Image (cartoon, rainbow, N blue to C red):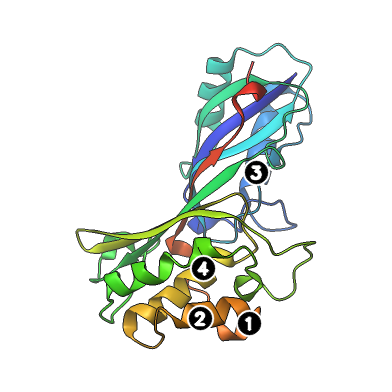
C-alpha cells in the first residue's frame, strides 16, 4: 500500500531534505522514525529537494508498506519520536502509482524579508537593511510569467534536461515589517527562487530597473541575474496534486 505523508519542518538545523552521509536531514529523520515504529525498513520519496536551512510548511512525501496502518495512530507516534522541528500533519492512502515528486502539478514558495532587525526571526527571514521599493519589485515580478526559459536563475552545475518552467503567479506583499514574495510554478530549477528574489531585491534598491529583467532572462546567463539570497528566508508552502491519486 502506498501513502502520502504531509509534513512541515523548520529547516535551520538540517542539511536539507535529501539523505546525506554524516549530517542530519529530514529524509533521514523520517526514515529512522518509521523504521523504529513499524519494525521494517521504509524508503521515503520526497516531492523534491530543499536546500540546507530551507523550511517547509506543507511538504509531501510517499512511502510503501505491507503493514495495515491506523493512520491517526501512526501520526501520533511519529510526532512523539521526531524532533520538535519536524511535524507530521497527515498520512493518507493513495494509488499505487502515485508519486510525490513526478505527480506534483504545482509548487508554491514564499520568501520572507524583514525590513527591521527582529531577533525572533533570525533563522526564519532575511534582514535587509536597505530601503526596498515594493511597487517596482512587483512590477518586475509581473514580467516572470511572460517567460518559460529560466536558465539565468538556475544553479550553474545542475543536471536537467530543460530549463523550462511555467510560472503562474509571482508577487510581493508587505505584512507589518515583513515583505513576503510568493511564487507558484509547475516546477522549479535548483536555486531558482533564491536567485529570482536576489534579482528582484536589486530592482527594489534601484540597482536594476524592472525592464532590465527582460534582458536578464533572455541572456540565459546566471551571472546576469542577482545574487542568491540566504536559504533561511525560503519556505515551501504548497504542493498540488491531481485528486484522482487519493483513495
Find disc 4 in the rendering and name its residue: 194
**Mark 3 vs mark 1: in front:** 1
Relative to the observer, which residue lies in front, 227 or 183?
Answer: 183
Q: Which of marks 1 and 4 is nearer the N terminus?
A: 4
Q: Which x, y percent locates residue 24? A: 63, 53
In percent of width and height, residue 128 lies at 32, 76
As drawn, 216 above or below 139:
below
State the quadrant of the C terminus.
top right
- Marks 1 and 2, how far apart at CA: 13 Å
Q: Which of marks 1 and 4 is in front?
A: 1
Task: Give SS at disc 4.
Answer: helix
Q: Give me the residue at 34% from left, 86% from top.
A: 206
The structure residue drawn at horizontal position 60% and vertical position 30%, both measured from the top left corner, is: 5
Q: 77 or 246, which lies in front?
A: 246
Rounded to the nearest angstrom, the CA distance separating label 3 from label 2 is 27 Å
Label 3 or label 2, whichever lies nearer to me, is 2
Residue at horizontal 23 percent and vertical 71 percent from the top:
116
Q: Is mark 3 on a helix, strand or loop?
A: loop
Instruction: Give the mark nearest the N terminus, 3 or 1.
Output: 3
Q: What element carries label 1?
A: helix
Tell me if residue 142 comes above or below residue 106 in the rendering.
below
Q: Tell me which numbered mark, 2 or 4, is placed earlier along the sequence.
A: 4
Q: Residues within 10 Å of mark 3 (few under 14, many from 20)?
A: some
Q: Name the residue under label 3.
A: 47
Query: Which residue in the protein does label 2 denote?
Result: 226
Image quarter hosting the N terminus: top right
Front label number (1 vs 2): 1
Q: Name the residue under label 1.
A: 219
Amino acid at each position: 500500500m502506498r501513502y502520502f505523508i504531509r509534513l512541515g519542518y523548520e529547516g535551520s538545523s538540517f542539511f536539507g531534505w535529501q539523505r546525506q552521509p554524516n549530517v542530519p536531514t529530514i529524509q533521514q529523520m523520517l526514515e529512522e522514525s518509521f523504521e523504529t515504529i513499524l519494525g521494517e525498513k521504509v524508503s521515503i520519496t520526497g516531492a523534491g529537494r530543499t536546500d540546507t536551512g530551507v523550511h517547509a510548511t506543507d511538504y509531501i512525501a510517499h512511502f510503501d508498506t505491507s503493514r495495515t496502518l491506523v493512520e491517526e495512530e501512526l501520526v501520533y507516534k511519529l510526532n512523539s519520536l521526531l524532533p520538535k522541528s519536524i511535524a507530521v500533519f497527515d498520512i493518507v492512502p493513495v494509488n499505487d502509482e502515485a508519486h510525490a515528486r513526478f505527480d506534483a502539478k504545482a509548487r508554491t514558495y514564499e520568501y520572507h524579508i524583514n525590513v527591521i532587525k527582529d531577533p525572533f526571526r533570525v533563522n526564519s527571514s532575511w534582514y535587509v537593511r536597505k530601503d526596498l521599493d515594493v511597487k517596482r519589485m512587483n512590477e518586475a515580478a509581473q514580467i516572470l510569467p511572460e517567460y518559460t526559459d529560466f536558465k539565468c536563475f538556475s544553479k550553474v552545475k545542475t543536471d536537467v534536461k530543460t530549463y523550462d518552467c511555467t510560472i503562474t503567479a509571482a508577487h510581493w506583499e508587505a505584512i507589518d515589517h515583513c515583505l513576503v514574495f510568493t511564487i507558484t510554478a509547475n516546477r522549479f530549477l535548483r536555486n531558482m527562487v533564491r536567485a529570482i528574489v536576489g534579482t528582484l531585491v536589486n530592482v527594489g534598491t534601484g540597482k536594476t530597473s524592472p525592464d532590465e529583467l527582460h534582458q536578464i532572462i533572455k541572456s540565459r546567463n546566471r551571472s546576469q541575474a542577482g545574487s542568491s539570497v540566504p536559504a533561511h528566508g525560503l519556505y515551501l508552502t504548497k504542493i498540488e496534486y491531481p485528486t484522482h491519486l487519493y483513495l
